[in-house]
Image (cartoon, rainbow, N blue to C red):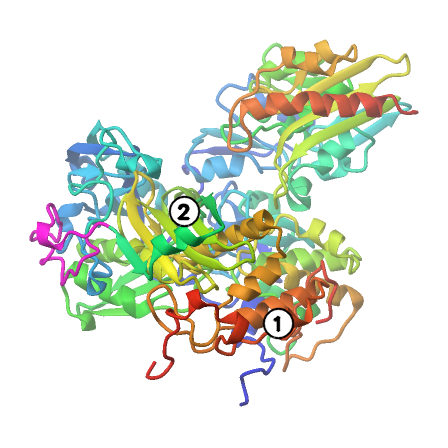
Amino acid sequence: MKVVGARIPRYDGVAHVTGRTTYVDDVRVPGTLWAKALRSPHHHAGITRLDTSRAESMPGVHAVITWKDVPLLALGHLAALGIPADEPLLARDEVRYKGEPIALVAAESEQLAAAAVDAIEIGFDERPALFDLRQAFDPDAPQIHPWGNWYPFFGTVESSLDAGADAHGVVERPPQHIRMDRRQIRKGDIDWAFANADTIVQGVYRPAAIEHAPLETQVCQVVPEPDGRLTIYSCTQALYFSLGVVAAHLKVPLNRLKLVGGTTGGGFGGKVDTATETMGSLLALKSGRPVKWRWTREEEFLCSSTRAPWHMEIATAVTKDGWILGQKMLTLHDSGAYARFSPYGLTKHSFHHTGAYSIPNLQFDGYVVFTNRVPTTAMRGFGVTSVSFAVETHMSRIADLLGLDPIEIRLKNANRIGDTSPNGVAYMDPSTVSTLQTIAEAIGQELPAEYRTMTNEPRAGDLLPEHLVAQIGSTEGH
Amino acid sequence: MRLTVNGVTHEIESGPLTPLLDVLREELGVTGTKAGCHQGGCGACTVLVDGEPKRSCLLPAAYAEDAEITTAEGIGTREGLAPIQQAFIHHYAAQCGFCTSGMMLAAQAYIDRGGSDDPEAIQEALGGHVCRCTGYSKIIDAVAAVARGDSFDLTTTAVGKYTTMATGGEA
Amino acid sequence: MATVSTAPDAATEVLRPTSEQEAIEVFGDGKDVLVVGGGTIVLPELTYHQLRPTRAVLLKDAGLAWIQRDSSRVTIGAMTPIEELVDFPAPIGPCARNIADVEIRSQATVAGNLCAGEGDEAPRGDLQGAFLAVGATVRSAGEGGIAEEPLEAFLPNRGTRLVLSISYDEPAVGAFAGLDRPHTHDYTALAVSGARDANGTIRLAATGAGSHGQRLLSAEGGDADAALQDVNPHDDALASAWYRRKVLPVLVRRVLTDLEGPA
């Protein structure tokens, strides 16, 4: 192999160090208009009035768009994975997070665009807001969506229409027969595990939201072409995905759009939401002019999606010699105001909720919870980073309570070939054992011979106690 | 008003209070200098003004009027890369590249002031620059290498066994 | 090429005085004129349309950047970059060194920092505490003419006058203790400065415990906890008022201890 294992300089290294890498904001198109957004100042409110006429008549303003300009207002980005739409591109009847976009203006200069946004007349009736996801389940909690405060579509959903979407793609009332309000995993016999444990170790883990904070803020440049197509310079991390999203919102065939990607100035999962391209396109179409929409750093911090906050409760049934017999887990995932990709993230989370360890008896319940916060999205390790943090912290806690070595207890329970994941998939070549041994060496911890010589070969002998037999799976026909 | 950028003097139409960053990017089309925050908080906009690193988003254009302004485009060419540029390539100090212009010019000024390969001193000099991709250690390695006077084989990189300041391990 | 200018309205009249006298004349009574020192505070406010001045005075060429020493009296011109203070003895040196980073410090000015308005997100005017502790006086222009007054008296009016210079007598011993965030940008959430003169008199001051730098008169007798009586900390993005109240006496104690040391 010529490339794997070789030390090859980046192909864009010279461009980066000579200032010649072209990011979206570096693209220069004559006649480009500046876009600015009118955003909700409230966490939760009904929209009682929206009048853009003053803004539209200002000199230098070439287009103003609202929800009425969007051919398909609400699009489920992951409808193909059974997650129907719940988020209008531009707010129509209500706003559910501070910063939610309501209207956009395209004007000759940034200053003019900002002045035009200020000239849009808007009325709100404020509603109580929900910020703490634990309170989402209280009967008197503010209601964020027509179906309540947690995602109800974990059952099989074929499409947004199937979920009861209207002509604008907005789902008001999901049909009862497809309601399934959590991601659930049951494996083995959890009651046996808890009855036969020497001790139950409990913990609650609550990692907070994290802002991606890429150096390059969200930005797009859209150019209407003479043949009626649009060229969209995008900072997206997922070019074809975003192409599909824009085409679906605009109700045009894919070949009407040309997305030009390139170097993204940092994404980390925060540039998969297709946050600017559709609105930029609508402004370009309405004005007939190229349009650029570049978020300020303040918008990036306050309005762009973040990694979700999570609330995880773990109770583990353990023996005094360090076997983990079973685990109960409740996960609340804070999706913010809209679902976006959260159900997918929670599903991944559920498949990996035992971390790097083989735990045969499981009870997992996970909810995608809505709050009046900025919608959350992917960020490096989406869904799994949270559970890694929780499981590893919990393992150390178990070791501490049992008086066992934290590396040895992990080695004992580590995934091996043939052990199965929470959703029953057999591991082909898990690296937990070798990773732990490398860590021990790196920190200068001498492991006893029994642990030093462990491998990830299928469990046998002392490493295969009775309680782990039933979870062994087949690695054939993977 | 006239501004001299990378050795070329331009007659400028933007007003004297326009941030230098916007004159460079929007009026002159010299886009190597990046706009990360427009409030001096990230360092992506740093340029050299008479060899001194300044945040161009905070500098009124009038304040750069009689000075030599140097941007990332001006410290070396593809055929003749400056040592700091070579170091950034060889030590894998750029990933997305958005912080690179500013980071590199601050490093150039540090080297020109006689900066040493001491990681603490390098961190102090580059303290106003945010990088979200690299975790900084390779940037510090690159600057230290230039301070030591290393030469760089651009057909390969120094990336290998992970180097951190904590372990002081080998590249 | 699109002129995407985030500059203020073309109607802003920009004045560039080339001497102290000219600067005083164009500043006038300070009404309706924006003073641009280094630009580090004002430029973002212009960019984000928080300021729309009709007149702006750019001070770079007004000859206000200098440092004079006359035995133990130090006088600093208004436009002196903060970076030139980092090697001064405590409290001023460590306080200056703690501000932002080297690039910002080489552009930001001493007077600009002293005159910073109250900040929403973080305390501003880091140097106020240090200069209060050394008993600095401010020479300024504005309504009523040139005035020279203690910094304490100047601070409430700092938005209406043009600072020309700051002077103080070098203390026998100085000290500085700051609460920092381990962060690229050293935002000082709370800091205490102290100075002991040749007679043994102690002055203490805090930045980040109120709307501008405050003397800590109640603690100057040695009772660190009494400093809480002199302050009115706010919640902001860096720290809560509660936390500031907890930490203030700790910083005061450190400064008092350092001030007991030899000159």
Q: Quadrant of residue A95?
A: top left
Q: Main secondary structure of the magenta part?
A: loop
Viewer-proximal residue among A352 and A400 = A400
Q: Is residue A196 visible?
A: yes
Chain letter of the residue carrying label 1? B
Above/below status of C35 relative to B18: above
- Across and down, in percent, residue A169 comes to 12, 53
Q: Percent from the top left, x then y, of residue A365? A: 31, 51
Dot 2 falls on which chain?
A: A
Q: Is residue A117 magenta?
A: no
C222 vs B10, nearest the viewer: C222
The residue stretch that appears in magenta: A153-181
Q: Is residue C226 left or right of residue C260?
A: left
- Report the residue marked by disc 1: B89
Q: Amino acid at mark 2?
A: Met
Task: Using residue A314 as the reference point, say whether residue A332 is left or right of it.
Answer: left
Counting the numbered discs, the total is 2
Q: Is residue C151 above or below residue C97?
A: above
- Residue at 64% x, 65% y is A439
The residue at which mark 2 appears reads as A312
Q: Can the viewer see residue A231 in this picture?
A: no
Q: Are marks 1 and 2 on the same chain?
A: no
Residue C222, placed above or below residue A213: above
Can you tell which of label 1 and label 2 is closer to the viewer?
Answer: 2
At mark 2, the secondary structure is strand
Q: What amino acid is found at the position of numbered circle 1 in the picture?
A: Ile
